[in-house]
Amino acid sequence: MTRNGRHNGNGHKTETPDVSHIRNVEVTHETSDISVKGVMMFVIVLSVSIAIVSGGVWIMFRYFNAEEAKEPQPGPMALQKNERLPPEPRLQTNPRADLRELRESEEKRLDSYGWVDRNAGIVHIPIEDAIKLTLQRGLPSRPATEQQVVK
């Protein structure tokens, strides 16, 4: 039919039929679809159950708080909870900050002069200076023995 008609291209009706002329004065609603009494009973039972469970939880928390208050307090010389620490070694709590701190300290050490062991006369120097000295002096090596020279 036409675009404004009652059928689209595949033969199905697209408009709801007019049923305004159908009247049944005796029926106000369909009672077989849902039971209002059943829904109301469910809501009442659910509300009572929630009230009972909430009251039970409230009583339980009051009991637990009273039991905790009965426990003896530690002596004045005892360590507080926040003062007690587990024995060493402890787990790392902030690895990124620890790694950053380690790298900063290593960078400072690598970019400066300082003693490693003063008694033995061992010092550390910046890497750039060490590279220059190695290029000037050459790599240290053992003196060649007669056997190595013959080969």
Image (cartoon, grey):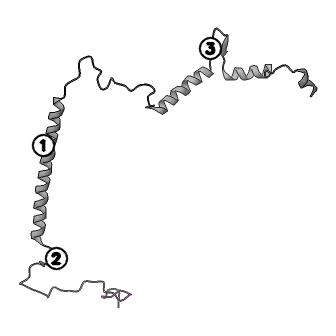
Q: Which quarter shows the N terminus?
A: bottom left
Three-letter code, disc 1:
Ile
Q: Quadrant of residue 117?
A: top right
Count of labels in the image? 3
Does residue 50 sit above or below 110 in this rendering?
below
Q: Quadrant of residue 34?
A: bottom left
Mark carried by residue 142: none
Residue occupied by mark 1? 59
Horizontal side, residue 123 vs residue 97: left or right: right
Upstream in sequence: badge 3 or badge 2: 2
* Residue 77: in magenta span: no
- Front-lying residue, 84 or 46: 84
The range drawn in magenta is 6-11
Upstream in sequence: badge 2 or badge 1: 2
Q: Position of residue 47 (x, y in %)?
A: 12, 57
Upstream in sequence: badge 3 or badge 1: 1
Q: Position of residue 111 (x, y in %)?
A: 62, 21
- In three-dimensional space, the C-alpha distance between marks 3 and 1, rounded to whole angstroms, equals 69 Å
Instruction: Assess disc 1: are there few (<14), some (14-19) or many (≥20) residues with their C-alpha within 10 Å of its C-alpha.
Output: few
* Residue 10: in magenta span: yes
Residue occupied by mark 3? 114
Does residue 133 sit above or below 6 in this rendering?
above
> Which residue is situated farthest in the bottom direction here?
1
Residue occupied by mark 2? 33
The residue sitting at 13% across, 55% down in the picture is: 49
Horizontal side, residue 63 vs residue 90: left or right: left
Three-letter code, disc 2:
Asp
Give the SS element for disc 3. Answer: strand
The residue sitting at 11% across, 51% down in the picture is: 52
The residue sitting at 55% across, 23% down in the picture is: 105
The residue sitting at 14% across, 59% down in the picture is: 46
